[in-house]
Image (cartoon, rainbow, N blue to C red):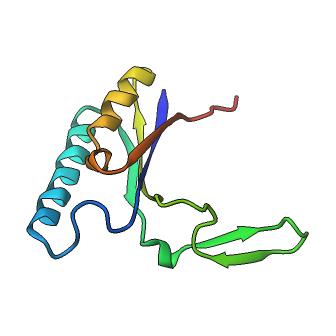
């Protein structure tokens, strides 16, 4: 069963680029990714560019409207994701708890809907 792990944190929280802590943080992500690959759980995963590069698209008025940035009024933004193949929700939650951002942000775990 596939689970999407959506990684959220506030920009500026956690280790920052250019610091010694950031190097260790990136290494932790690389180690996590490798662990999921070796366990046969990794389907896909990517980091996202900062929210300043985001655009939100809507057709609510019948025509395309765009707004710079994310739409949600929140302190935390989606920063990346992992798509994992796990046995069940418990397994997916255990895997998500190992994602480095879980220490200063949030990881939302959702089963992927399968259409037959």
Residue at 56%, 35% (x, y): give it.
Answer: 112
Q: Tell me which corner region of the image, top left, top right, bottom left or bottom right, holds residue 93.
A: top left
Q: Is residue 41 visible?
A: no
Where does residue 67 sit, x and y in percent of width and height?
Answer: 68, 77
14 horizontally vs 57: left or right: left
Where does residue 78 sit, x and y in percent of width and height?
Answer: 47, 58
Q: Is residue 54 visible?
A: yes
Q: Nearer the viewer, residue 87 or 24?
A: 24
Q: Tell me which corner region of the image, top left, top right, bottom left or bottom right, holds residue 9.
A: bottom left
Q: How many marks?
A: 0
Q: Please tell me whether residue 65 is drawn above or below residue 110 in the rendered image.
A: below
Quadrant for the C terminus in the image: top right
Where does residue 7 sit, x and y in percent of width and height?
Answer: 41, 50
- In the image as oriented, which residue stretches furthest toward the right? 62
Residue at 69%, 32% (x, y): give it.
Answer: 115
99 horizontally vs 74: left or right: left
Q: Nearer the viewer, residue 84 or 16?
A: 16
Residue at 63%, 31% (x, y): give it.
Answer: 114
Q: Please tell me whether residue 99 is drawn above or below residue 72 in the rendered image.
A: above
Residue at 36%, 24% (x, y): give it.
Answer: 91
Where does residue 3 sit, x and y in percent of width and height?
Answer: 47, 35
61 horizontally vs 55: left or right: right
Q: Please tell me whether residue 83 is drawn above or below residue 46 in the rendered image.
A: above
Q: Please tell me whether residue 40 is drawn above or below residue 105 in the rendered image.
A: above
């Amino acid at each position: 069963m596939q689970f999407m792990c959506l990684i959220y944190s506030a920009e500026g929280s956690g280790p920052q680029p250019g610091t010694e802590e950031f190097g260790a943080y990136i290494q932790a992500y690389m180690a996590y990714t490798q662990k999921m690959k070796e366990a046969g759980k990794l389907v896909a995963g990517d980091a996202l560019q900062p929210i300043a590069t985001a655009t939100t698209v809507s057709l609510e008025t019948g025509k395309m409207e765009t707004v710079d940035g994310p739409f949600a009024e929140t302190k935390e933004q989606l920063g990346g994701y992992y798509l994992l193949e796990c046995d069940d929700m418990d397994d997916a939650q255990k895997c998500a708890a190992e994602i480095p951002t879980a220490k200063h942000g949030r990881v939302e775990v959702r089963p992927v809907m399968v259409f037959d």
